[in-house]
């Protein structure tokens, strides 16, 4: 009885002193993975089983989009990221990353471009298929971002079993890919003239990258899951090697050493790494003033620590703060609406879209 | 008593022996790959990988192998009893098959991924079968003659040392992580404090590790008592630090008393058996 009473007090005190209030906007989302704002009211979101949906946040109606490609929904695979073309207002094009089987029945990462006409995808075209076949759909990466020059970046994970291939340029395991919106290869890609290297590669030596953003200034940031420990945030530059698995701050899930090295000349150091792992799942750079206390911060959702890490960098050191842990669920995605309101997507078969209300 | 007890301890011993043969397969395959990408692999980094894998990867493998070997050797025992087949090669093949099957099922039924770096190649699979083969051979050797209490004492002493090895390796190779486990932020300590921490903690765990190994080899109870005294001392002085010097409560004293009691019990058993014999 005493314990129950104490728990009640704790619960009450937690909510009483909570900094933010939360409002569930949508619920019962089936393994929702990613969402993007079409406008202040409408979002487009993916569910890993292969469903793309449009939701109105005001009346909470949800409509399924037709003609979505067939995906391989298993483990970490399925319909993953969704991104709007920078010229979406005029061309209505959307981009979807997903895992599916290739002609050899192996699973790999695909990127599709299509025109969104009402609730239907039209003129669909696979603009990229990763040369990263694997038996099981894990460590796919699958995040999409646009550079300021209009070209498109896509993260392609190391496939877990093929981690060593992240260090060679003849495949797409553990790489960040850069292509044009039509799937062609930009002439200024860093490895277009390197013999034996795949020309789509922008950077390499990555693991499973589930956060990718381009700041207004044009800087590219990525975060990736480490194994047991060693989650990283990296500042991405073309052609650079980020070291996995030759250098790492983590150890294998089995307890084995992956590499005894944490640094080497010619391999980039992360801006920040986490030991133990927080399992970072998405990242934005918040540049609005709706939440003044969050302005100019990286906001990173985490699956294991079940919070959002607010990270800032100054003079070579980082400052971290844990936010929104009151939600107490694995957080899959974070986006800011056009007016700067933050929304969180929770992970799992009964996912929720949660609106973070600014402090009064 | 020992007629029956020798079988489970023979399984445990064979599993630990097979682990010792298996983990270097993964370690060496990683070191070869690291060398191939121009990483500065040397003696120290090689030792770090091999020893850490033996201790940390080995702990998980040990549990899997104990289960696998228990089933395989029981089956081999039944075959030997009810057929003309038998002998060391039957157990050796059973051991090899147990490891191969366990690693196969781990991939197919559980993880769908190859967790063991050394099992990705055909050569690695053959070497793992070989580890099981020699594990089975060792098991047959252990059960084929009478054993007394020293067999169990040796296994428990070695197993104790095997567990301590993890702490020794952490303090030798990654003191920053080891310090964090004990509540220190290593980089925030002064240089003198870092030095004191490293030399004292490393020698503490290395010494007790060596005491356990020497006790297991020589069966001289003094070595086991030495390890026991050190950990009992740590537990007692932990309590004195809490109650006499006002430090925060630290429940690690429970583990310190367990680590003290374990080798002390082994030393005491040797003493009592020696007295009984005389």
Image (tube, coloured by chain):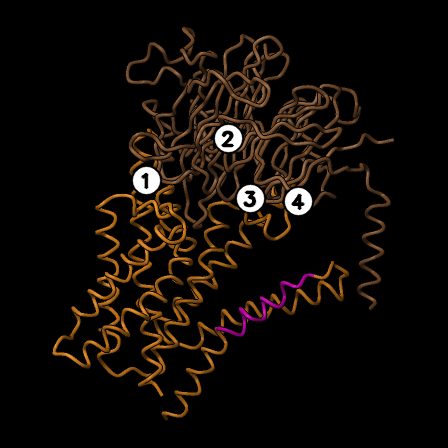
Instruction: Return the x and y of residue A49 as percentages of the image width and height.
Output: 50, 38
Q: Which residue is mark 3?
A: B176
Provide residue B270's location: percent of width, then percent of height. Answer: 41, 82
- What secondary structure is the magenta-colored segment mainly? helix
Please report the bounds of the magenta region as a residue range: B250-262
Looking at the rendered structure, the secondary structure element under dot 3 is helix
Q: Nearer the viewer, mark 1 or mark 4?
A: 4
Q: Tell me which chain the residue with mark 1 is part of.
A: B
For the residue pair B218 and A276, the one nearer the viewer reads as A276
- A7 above or below A342? below
Looking at the picture, do discs 4 and 2 lie on one chain? Answer: yes
1 and 4 marks on the same chain: no
Q: Is residue A84 above or below residue B137?
A: above
Considering the numbered disc 2 on the image, is that residue within a helix, a strand or a loop? strand
Position of residue A310 relative to residue A351, above or below, is: above
Q: Residues within 10 Å of mark 2 (few under 14, many from 20)?
A: many
Which disc is residue A329 wearing? 4
User: How far apart are labels 3 and 4 at the CA level?
Assistant: 31 Å
Q: Which chain is brown?
A: A
- Mark 1 vs mark 3: in front: 1
- Tell me the distance, in whole angstroms, between the alpha carbons under discs 2 and 3: 27 Å
Q: Name which residue lies at 81% across and 48% down.
A: A14
Q: Quadrant of residue A100?
A: top left
Q: Secondary structure at mark 1?
A: helix
């Amino acid at each position: 009885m005493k314990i129950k009473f104490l728990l009640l007090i704790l619960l009450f005190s937690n909510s009483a002193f909570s900094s933010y209030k939360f409002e569930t906007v949508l619920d019962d989302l089936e393994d929702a993975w990613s969402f993007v704002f079409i406008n202040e009211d409408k979002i487009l979101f993916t569910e890993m089983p292969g469903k793309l949906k449009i939701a109105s946040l005001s009346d909470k109606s949800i409509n399924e989009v037709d003609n979505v490609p067939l995906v391989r929904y298993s483990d970490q695979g399925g319909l993953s990221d969704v991104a709007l073309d920078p010229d979406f207002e005029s061309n209505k094009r959307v981009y979807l990353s997903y895992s599916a089987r290739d002609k050899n029945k192996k699973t790999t990462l695909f990127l599709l471009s299509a025109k969104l006409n009402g609730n239907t995808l039209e003129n669909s075209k696979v603009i990229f298929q990763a040369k990263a076949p694997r038996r099981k759909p894990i460590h796919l990466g699958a995040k999409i971002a646009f550079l300021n020059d209009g070209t498109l970046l896509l993260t392609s994970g190391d496939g877990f079993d093929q981690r060593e291939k992240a260090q060679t340029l003849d495949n797409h395991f553990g790489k960040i890919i850069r292509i044009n919106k039509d799937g062609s290869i930009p002439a200024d890609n860093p490895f277009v003239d390197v013999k034996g290297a795949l020309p789509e590669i922008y950077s390499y030596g990555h693991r499973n990258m589930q956060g990718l953003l381009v700041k207004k200034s044009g800087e590219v940031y990525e975060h990736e899951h480490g194994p047991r420990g060693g989650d990283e945030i990296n500042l991405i530059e073309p052609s650079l090697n980020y070291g996995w698995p030759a250098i790492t701050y983590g150890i294998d899930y089995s307890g084995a050493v992956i590499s005894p090295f944490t640094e080497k000349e010619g391999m980039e150091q992360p801006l920040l790494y986490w030991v133990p792992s927080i399992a970072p799942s998405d990242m934005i750079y918040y540049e609005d003033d709706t939440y003044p206390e969050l302005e100019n911060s990286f906001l990173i959702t985490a699956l294991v620590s079940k919070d959002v890490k607010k990270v800032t960098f100054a003079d070579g050191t980082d400052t971290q703060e844990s936010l929104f842990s009151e939600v107490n669920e694995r957080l899959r995605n974070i986006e800011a609406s056009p007016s700067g309101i933050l929304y969180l997507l929770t992970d799992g078969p009964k996912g929720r879209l949660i609106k973070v209300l600014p402090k009064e | 008593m020992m007629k029956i007890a020798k079988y489970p301890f023979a399984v445990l011993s064979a599993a630990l022996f097979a682990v010792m043969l298996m983990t270097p397969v993964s370690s060496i395959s990683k070191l070869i790959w690291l060398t191939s990408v121009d990483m500065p692999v040397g003696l120290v980094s090689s030792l770090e990988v091999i020893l850490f894998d033996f201790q940390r990867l080995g702990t998980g493998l040990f549990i899997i192998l104990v289960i696998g070997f228990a089933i395989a050797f029981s089956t081999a025992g039944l075959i030997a009893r009810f057929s003309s087949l038998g002998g060391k090669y039957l157990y050796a093949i059973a051991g090899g098959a147990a490891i191969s099957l366990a690693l196969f099922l781990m991939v197919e039924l559980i993880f769908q991924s190859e967790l063991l770096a050394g099992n990705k190649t055909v050569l690695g699979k053959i070497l793992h079968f070989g580890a099981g083969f020699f594990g089975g051979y060792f098991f047959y050797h252990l059960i084929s003659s009478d054993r007394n209490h020293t067999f169990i004492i040796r296994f428990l002493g070695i197993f104790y040392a095997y567990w301590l090895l993890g702490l020794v390796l952490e303090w030798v190779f990654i003191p920053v992580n080891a310090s964090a486990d004990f509540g220190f932020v290593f980089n925030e300590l002064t240089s003198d404090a870092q030095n004191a921490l490293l030399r004292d903690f490393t020698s503490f765990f290395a010494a007790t590790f060596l005491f356990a190994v020497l006790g297991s080899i020589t069966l001289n109870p003094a070595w086991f008592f030495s390890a026991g005294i050190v950990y009992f001392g740590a537990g007692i002085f932990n309590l004195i630090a809490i109650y006499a010097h006002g430090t925060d409560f630290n429940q690690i004293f429970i583990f310190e008393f367990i680590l003290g009691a374990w080798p002390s019990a082994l030393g005491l058993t040797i003493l009592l058996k020696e007295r009984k014999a005389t």
